Amino acid sequence: MSLEEYERHYASLNSESGCESVSGRSAASGAFSGEEERLHYIPIRVLGKGSFGEATLYRRTEDNSLVVWKEIDLNCLSDKKRRDVMNEISILSILQHNNIIAYFNHFMDKNTLLIELEYCNGGNLYDKINQQKGELFKEEVVVWYLYQIAAAVAHIHKAGVLHRDIKTLNIFLTKTNLIKLGDYGLAKKLGSEYSMAESCVGTPYYMSPELCQGVKYNFKSDIWAMGCVLFELLTLTRTFDATNPLNLCVKIVQGNWTMEINSDVYTSDLIKLVYECLDQDPEKRPTAEQILEQPVISRVRVELEERVAALNSAIKKPKLSTVTETPVAVVTTRSREVYFWGGGKFTPQKLDMFKGGSSAQHVCAGETHFAVVTVEKELYTWASVQGGAKMVGQLGHGDQASYRQPRRVERLQGKAIRQVSCGADFTACVTDEDQMYMFGSDYYGCVGVENELGMEVLEPVLLDFFQERPVRQVSCGDNHVVALTRSGDIYSWGCGEHGRLGLDCEDDFSSPMQVEVPKGAVIDSVYCGSDCTFFLTEFGKVLACGSNELNKLGLNLGITGIKNHPGEGYQGIPYTTTLTLVKQLSRFKIQFIAPGKTHTAAIDERGRLMTFGCNKFGQLGVKDFKKHQGVQILVGPFGGKFVTKVSCGDGFTIAATEDNQIFAWGNAGNGRLGMPADKGFGSEVCPALPRPIFGSLHHVPDLSCRGWHTILIMEKVLNSKTIRSNSSGLSIASGQCSTSSVDLETDSATDSELGMLGRTVEADMDDRGLETPIFSMDSKTNESSCPSWLQKELLDAEFIPMPDDSQDSIDPLTKPYTESATLPYEELDQIKAAAGKSLLPAACVDYERMNGVETGRSEQSCCGASVELTHLRETVNRQQAQIQMLQKQCNDQQKENERLWRAIQSLRADAGLVDAGQKQGSAPQERESGWSCCDLHNWTPALINSSRVPCILSELVCWSIYVDRVVAGGQIVSGHPSRPAGGRSSAGPRGQKGPRGV
């Protein structure tokens, strides 16, 4: 098909579908978008600005992980800086190591390049050194940092990459002191270990002598920079310092460093290693691998490797795309706010502190205090009591003051807090390293240190018991704690009254004790009530222990077969000291449990909300205040709604739904429901039916109730935009690094220099892992002005071949309709053939006009072309759907024809023409035996006049004759646009009319 025919065909497609608006086009692209992976991002705060642009922290909602987007405005960059930017993407895409900043993705938003990278929440090594305030690092800390830096440098050197900008500002840290080497904008790909580079780049304070002298340099230049970083770690000062660049270069070449390393603090092996890295002769400097083999590292290398692996496994990293199509980034700006109420506060109180980088991620309410974990893993606590009651350490601030405003727990600075849980007067939290910290009252032994620190622990203390037992989740009751480890073991301690610890006794324990889990049960999560505990298995079954007062555990058993005992249909179980199956919930697959003081709520996999326990204040939400023994499934206001969050307090319940509504019911006293008395929610009112609170719609990421108090996070969507393509002008090489890939920086070199030993080996653009046609100012001209990225898209595009004309004669009665005959054109094949020819510029413009966008033949931007290519794919998908519908109609007609032939054979037998049929051949074998439709026409009158055939079949016979003639004449070819797709026609093969006109 020629390009003109291609244009006319798509013009006809658009005319059939009518004029399409933008919204209509988006709706019509459902089939195409179904093949895309949408990744949703929420901006949090700007981390800083660099030479190319700014770095912004985002939260990916799919896995709740934090990532950094380097936003680079390409319009403001020179050609050299554009190559540096793309060089960084190319380098990062081939480097995968535990101590190297991970690259996840990149996108183009108009003229802004967005690079998605791993986030390090501990700052950089420069800040870490300044925070020491003159106090030297311990040698084991220096060795820990040195090992990680050397491992990262060894990895990039093994891949043939020269970093060229190693400095403390480019060495990033997590809160667990895990090193991540980043910023590869100046990195260079060398062809071999002996290759040399010659451009003068890098930060002056870390430049090697060969760089200062303007001579060739190689990987040993990075080793010099490592020596400077190590020198700073040992002395807390720069290795070389001067008032001007010239003086600085002189000091570097002369080896005149600022001070000597303190030999009283550090071992001679470590000091010797520093001076070896700072040797003036590059050949005498060790390699990164040789540094790792030094005794100061080698004797603890195995332990350090295991520690790095463990810390990396604890970091929640974004999941990489698993689909073949390019993922689509959906950036949504949201306002996230924290509200709390109760305890005399009838209206929700907004906390202005939790904004931007301090926006809340997880909240928890206790009897006397609140706790919030921010998106950057910091813990804030404050008191919720009235009258300034004295705290007992549950805030973790080192004193007993009742702080009325949220305050960060400074003792946990540098620790990435993942989860927090509040008891009556103590707090537990879990870090990303799966370590547990406790603080507050140790009256019942809830702190878990066997009262060694006194009855009041004012600062967070690390539980050594869980150092070898990584904690997955922790939950606190009023006076007990239950922890779930990564291995699936359960540990509990604290008050054991009513068997709430699940240890088959009611004793108190001041240190963690392992709970025996029923055989075959795998615990997925734990939930503590005031004096009870729930255990949720991986299959949605619920186990419970502790007090079953008013059936709040759902353990009461039904009684049947007993007469004259009205109202006693259940046998009460006061408490249980071992893990017992909650049979009333066994027919549901529970996803979440919310135990309250006297009642419990649960959510199953279908989003249904169910309640059981005490209903004195209508907290079950069943329209009355009667006693209900069984589990109540709430319909009413929740009918058809999917409940996402629920929490229970002292006589009340708060729930949030997927359609962004918040409901409250039960005891409204003391502001429990967050509504003032004049709104009908006073102390005397107890709504037994869920009522919506907060007038506008809000999404609730987290919710917690305890006692009289409630705290929740509310979120509103402000705006959203979709970044559909990440390949506009950029093509990233995926997979492992090959020795043939080279640097993108075009250092000047002659052909003779390239052939000399020790020179930089530069390769052509075709051999690079990163194509730069849109940014290149090269004077070379190609055969086509179409961008190479579009050529690649067209070359890689799928196309459906068109069958030859000979296939038009396929017998629809004998051959099925094949997939290869689904398209009446060869447009994609034609485009592929024209990808490397001069027709491509016209194709780039023509396919836009075919989709209803009138543009001139002016230069098209890469983003616009990418969008039009997306619309082209959408149109092809719609045509495939139409073709499938036509194919189905054809198949239905084939079945109808076969039925007609079977009827004809039956009529032959009834008319006594079996012998004739045997002589002439059966209908399905007509063409093979040479039997024609004219022979059938000759004996048709006798068939119709036969007294053995009902008259009503005459029309059927005529129709079958007509179908046979049409098929034999080749006028019905399934799916062809120029012929009827069925058995009806205005004229038969001999000019006769259809059966209705006979």
Image: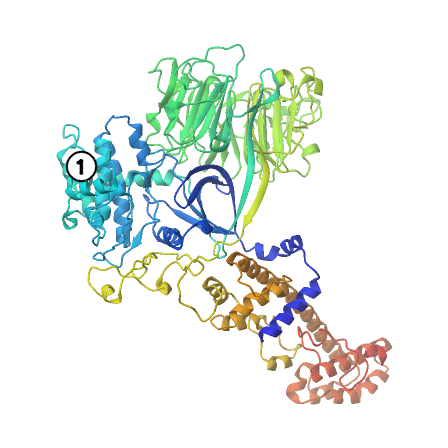
Q: Which residue is mark 1?
A: 257
Residue 193 shown left or right of residue 605 in the figure: left
Q: Does residue 946 sit above or below 556 in this rendering? A: below
Three-letter code, disc 1: Trp
Task: Inspect this view and state whether residue 561 appears.
Answer: yes
Residue 554 shown left or right of residue 952 in the figure: left
Q: How many numbered circles are shown?
A: 1
By what rule are the colours in the image chosen? rainbow
Nearest to the observer: residue 496 or residue 312: 312
Residue 321 shown left or right of residue 940 in the figure: left
Q: Does residue 892 sit above or below 656 in this rendering? A: below
Q: Position of residue 765 (x, y in %)?
A: 37, 63
The answer to which quarter of the image holds residue 707 is top right
Q: Position of residue 578 (x, y in %)?
A: 47, 26
Q: Position of residue 874 (x, y in %)?
A: 60, 60
Answer few, some or many: residues within 10 Å of disc 1's Cα (few below 14, many 20 plus, some between 14 and 19).
some
Q: Position of residue 153 (x, y in %)?
A: 27, 47
Residue 515 shown left or right of residue 663 in the figure: left
The answer to which quarter of the image holds residue 314 is top left
Location of the N terminus by quadrant is bottom right
Location of the C terminus by quadrant is bottom right
Q: Residue at x 80, y 77 (%)?
A: 956
Q: Does residue 384 sit above or below 224 in this rendering? A: above
Task: Inspect this view and state whether residue 578 appears.
Answer: no
Q: Secondary structure at mark 1?
A: loop
